[in-house]
Image (cartoon, rainbow, N blue to C red):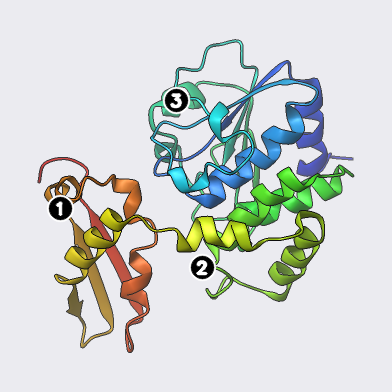
Amino acid sequence: MKKSNLILIRDKIKYAKQIALICHIRPDGDTLGSALALYNHIVNFKNCTVFCDDTLPQKYDFLKGYDKISSGDINNEYDLIICIDCSDLNRTGKYNFFIKNHNNVINIDHHISNEKFGNINYVIEASSTCEIIYFLLKHFDIKADKYIYTCIYCGLASDTGNFSHSNTTYVTFEIAAELAKTIGDISFINQKIFKETPLNKLMLLAEILRNIKLYIDGKMAVLSVSNIDVNKYQCDIHDTEGFVDYAINIQGVEIGAILLESEKN
C-alpha cells in the first residue's frame, strides 16, 4: 500500500539529519508563523534552520524563533528542504536554484495556484498554511505548547484578515478557539499584528490612498507604491502589507490590487 503524504512527511523529518525551512519573499504572518511553528517542534530533536531571502517585518518579532531566522546561504549539509507557503519557486528568492536541484523537497502550501514543485507536495485548500501545520502536528500526535500555538494563531489571523475574509470557515474558528485555550490571552497577538502602526507607515498609507485609481465602473481599485514614496517616509516595502485591504474594502469594489515598484520604473 502506498504511503500517504502525511506519513511520508513524518518519516522524512524523522530520518533527516539537517532540515532547512524556507519562507517566501515579502514574508507575512502565515509563512513566518507556519515555519516557526514547525521549527519550534523540530529543533527540540534535530538540527533545523528557518531561511528567508528578505528582511523580516518587525511586527512579528514576538514569535519564538524569529531572531533565529537566517538570510544566509544554504549548504549541502541540509538533506531535507521544506518550503512553507510558497506557491512557486520564484517565491523562495535566491534559494530557488538550490531547491530546484535538491532531491529531497517537501512543499507545504494552501494556495490553489501552487505549482507542486516538491518531491512531496502537501497542498490543501485552507484558510492558511498555518491551518495545515495545525492539523499536521495533530496528526503526528505532537503536544504543542503556547509558543507553537502562538505562531499558528498568527498565521491564521493574518491570512484571514483577522477572521474577516471569505477564506474564514467554521473550521478556522474551531482551530482558533483550540489555540486560545492553550495560549490564554490572545489580545497581545492582535495588538502586534493589527494595531501597533508606526506613524511613518500611516503617512505612507495616506500618500498612497490619495492616488487610488478606480476602474471597471468602480468595481476594481488599484493602489500604486513607488520607491520614492517608500523612501520619503523612511519605510520599507514590507510596510505596505495589508494596504490592499483598503482598496478591497471600498463600497462597490470587487477586486483590489496593489502595484509595488521593485526597482526603478
* Numbered circle sitting on residue 177: none
With 73 as the anchor, is 230 left or right in this view? Answer: left
> Secondary structure under badge 2?
loop
Total residue callouts:
3
Where does residue 117 sit, x and y in percent of width and height? 53, 38
Where does residue 180 sit, x and y in percent of width and height? 76, 61
Where does residue 129 sit, x and y in percent of width and height? 61, 52
**Cα distance between the residues tagged 3 and 2:** 27 Å
Q: Residue at x 69, y 68 (%)?
A: 172
Q: Residue at x 44, y 26 (%)?
A: 95
With 165 as the anchor, is 46 left or right in this view? Answer: right
**Cα distance between the residues tagged 2 and 1:** 25 Å
Neighbours of disc 3 within 10 Å: few (<14), some (14-19), many (20+): some
- Residue under pointer 1: 229
* Numbered circle sitting on residue 71: 3
CB atoms of marks 2 and 1 within 8 Å: no
- Residue under pointer 2: 161
* Residue in front for this viewpoint, 216 or 182: 182
* Residue in front for this viewpoint, 202 or 241: 202
> Secondary structure under badge 1?
helix
Q: Is residue 99 visible?
A: yes
Q: Which image quadrant for residue 73?
A: top left
Q: Split into 4 quadrants, where in the image is the N terminus?
A: top right
Give above or below for 61 relative to 256.
above
> Secondary structure under badge 3?
loop
Q: Which image quadrant for residue 221?
A: bottom left
Looking at marks 2 and 1 on the same chain, the residue that comes earlier in the sequence is marked by 2
Q: Is residue 112 visible?
A: no
Looking at marks 3 and 2 on the same chain, the residue that comes earlier in the sequence is marked by 3
